[in-house]
């Protein structure tokens, strides 16, 4: 009887373990499906776009190189047109004799004959390495046998730097022109364009050029949608060392960046964005999956630089109704907001303002003016769960208070059942129903018994 009982206990435990394992698998599957659903808009948005990707010094020696190149192969199969520019500075340093002097002036290397030979050798080795790894397709996937064509060429026309402040830079050059038709022809043939930091003068002289400057020049010349810099840093940081997820060109330029290499990449991204490249990205090659996370998630993995604000408030439009309904539905179901039909939203959409992040509505609020009394009602304040507690609701509230001021309103009020304390923290004060505009008093729902709060504009 004891043995039978033990077997029963073991059997129950085994079943429990199997049940728990099944639950974990189900949760993992659900998470993957949800992630895939969220990537759908990005897959559509990136298809057919041109991305110039800078592989910084150390990227080709990183343990994550295979993963990184596989992620680029995946981008290629998803319809992204890729131009890769690889940096060779550290590879050149390693190839030179230890006793050979390295002369840098204002961040630019003086390239003598031996250094130029090392630059050619480093560029050739890296080119072959990238071509070899991309030829593998995507191992352990249905695309493992898919062929990715990689094409390189003499796309960079350069001119010698010459003599600056008494320093002769010898074989160091600057980008003069990019063969746009040549690069575009590669992309039109469904191949990856690979560009080394070497330029050729019209006289046939070979010159060593900056890889970051080359990436910037290529991105601007071909009208790239993104210029992505992959180096050792996670991105730009604020004064407290926190990663800055997105910023404008102006705010990026005002940041204090101590590392010279990162400062050069920041400046290149800013210049490119100011000349028509839609967005610049700074992220690290050290973190596995950082490239895909940056491109296929709302918050990304590094720093995004754009000419226009990545996240901005604006007036709502008819096309935003579906997003607003999705945002407020959970709050309506919980009783925090009064239910609104689609028809009502269509009629009142001009009263709404939204906070948009990369094309996604993450917060909304409405202002209903009562011009005859100089008051305005702020209503339907909602923030997406992923962005609560980060000041988005306060940002929209301030936008609406400013809008009320422009409409010559002298005060605003809210009716709420669950957010009284939050509005008190924003400078509102409790008020009685009799202080509401007459038209609003007549609509006041005594059964709902909402708290009334007011504040001056």
Image: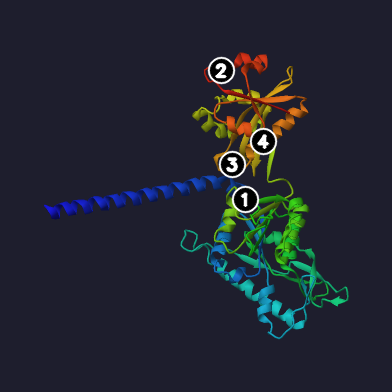
Q: How many marks?
A: 4
Depicted 282 relative to depicted 370: above or below: below
Q: Which residue reaches farthest right?
A: 166
Residues under labels 2 and 3: Cα distance?
A: 29 Å
Circle 1 residue: 46
Q: Quick check: marks 1 and 4 in contact, CB under 8 Å?
A: no
The x, y position of residue 366, in whole percent, is: 65, 28
Residues under labels 2 and 1: Cα distance?
A: 48 Å
The tag earlier along the polypeptide, 4 or 3, is 3
Circle 2 residue: 445
Quadrant of res 211: bottom right
The tag earlier along the polypeptide, 2 or 1, is 1
Residues under labels 1 and 4: Cα distance?
A: 29 Å
Circle 3 residue: 389
The tag earlier along the polypeptide, 2 or 3, is 3
The x, y position of residue 7, in whole percent, is: 18, 54
Residues under labels 4 and 3: Cα distance?
A: 13 Å
Quadrant of res 282: bottom right
Element class at badge 2: loop
Q: Quadrant of the C terminus?
A: top right
Q: Quick check: marks 2 and 1 in contact, CB under 8 Å?
A: no
Residues under labels 2 and 4: Cα distance?
A: 26 Å
The x, y position of residue 387, in whole percent, is: 58, 42
Circle 4 residue: 396
Q: Quick check: marks 3 and 1 in contact, CB under 8 Å?
A: no
Quadrant of res 420: top right
The tag earlier along the polypeptide, 1 or 4, is 1
Residues under labels 3 and 1: Cα distance?
A: 30 Å
């Amino acid at each position: 009887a004891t043995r039978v009982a033990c077997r029963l206990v073991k059997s129950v435990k085994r079943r429990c373990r199997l049940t728990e394992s099944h639950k974990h698998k189900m949760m993992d599957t659900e998470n993957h499906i949800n992630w895939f659903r969220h990537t759908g808009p990005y897959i559509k948005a990136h298809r057919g776009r041109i991305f110039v990707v800078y592989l910084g010094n150390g990227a080709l020696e990183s343990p994550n190189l295979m993963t990184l190149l596989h992620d680029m192969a995946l981008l290629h199969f998803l319809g992204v047109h890729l131009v890769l520019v690889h940096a060779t500075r550290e590879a050149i340093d390693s190839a030179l004799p230890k006793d050979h002097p390295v002369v840098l002036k204002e961040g630019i290397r003086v390239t003598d004959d031996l250094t130029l030979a090392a630059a050619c050798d480093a560029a050739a080795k890296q080119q072959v390495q990238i071509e070899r790894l991309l030829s593998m397709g995507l191992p352990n996937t249905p695309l493992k046998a898919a062929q990715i064509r990689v094409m390189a060429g003499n796309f960079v026309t350069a001119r010698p730097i010459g003599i600056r402040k008494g320093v002769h830079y010898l074989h160091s050059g600057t980008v003069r022109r990019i063969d746009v038709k040549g690069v575009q022809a590669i992309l039109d043939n469904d191949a990856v364009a690979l560009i080394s930091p070497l330029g050729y003068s019209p006289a046939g002289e070979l010159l060593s050029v900056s890889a970051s400057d080359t990436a910037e020049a290529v991105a601007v010349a071909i009208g790239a949608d993104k210029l992505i810099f992959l180096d050792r840093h996670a991105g730009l940081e604020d004064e407290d060392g926190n990663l800055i997820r997105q910023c404008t060109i102006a705010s990026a330029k005002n940041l204090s960046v101590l590392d010279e290499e990162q400062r050069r990449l920041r400046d290149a991204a800013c210049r490119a964005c100011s000349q028509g490249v839609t967005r610049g990205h700074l992220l690290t090659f050290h973190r596995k999956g950082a490239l895909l996370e940056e491109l296929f998630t709302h918050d990304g993995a590094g720093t995004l630089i754009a000419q226009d604000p990545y996240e901005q408030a604006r007036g709502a439009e008819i096309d935003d109704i579906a997003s607003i309904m999705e945002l407020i539905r959970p709050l309506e179901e919980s009783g925090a907001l009064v239910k609104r039909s689609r028809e009502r939203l269509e009629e009142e959409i001009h009263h709404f303002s939204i906070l948009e992040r990369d094309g996604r509505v993450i917060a909304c609020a409405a202002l209903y003016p009562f011009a005859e009394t100089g008051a305005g009602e702020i209503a339907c304040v909602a923030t997406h769960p992923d962005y609560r507690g980060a000041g988005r609701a306060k940002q929209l509230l301030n936008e609406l208070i400013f809008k009320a001021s422009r409409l010559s309103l002298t005060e605003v009020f809210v009716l709420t059942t669950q957010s009284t304390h939050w509005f008190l923290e924003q400078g509102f004060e409790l008020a009685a129903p009799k202080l509401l505009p007459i038209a609003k008093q007549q609509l006041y729902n005594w059964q709902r018994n909402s708290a009334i709060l007011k504040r001056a504009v």
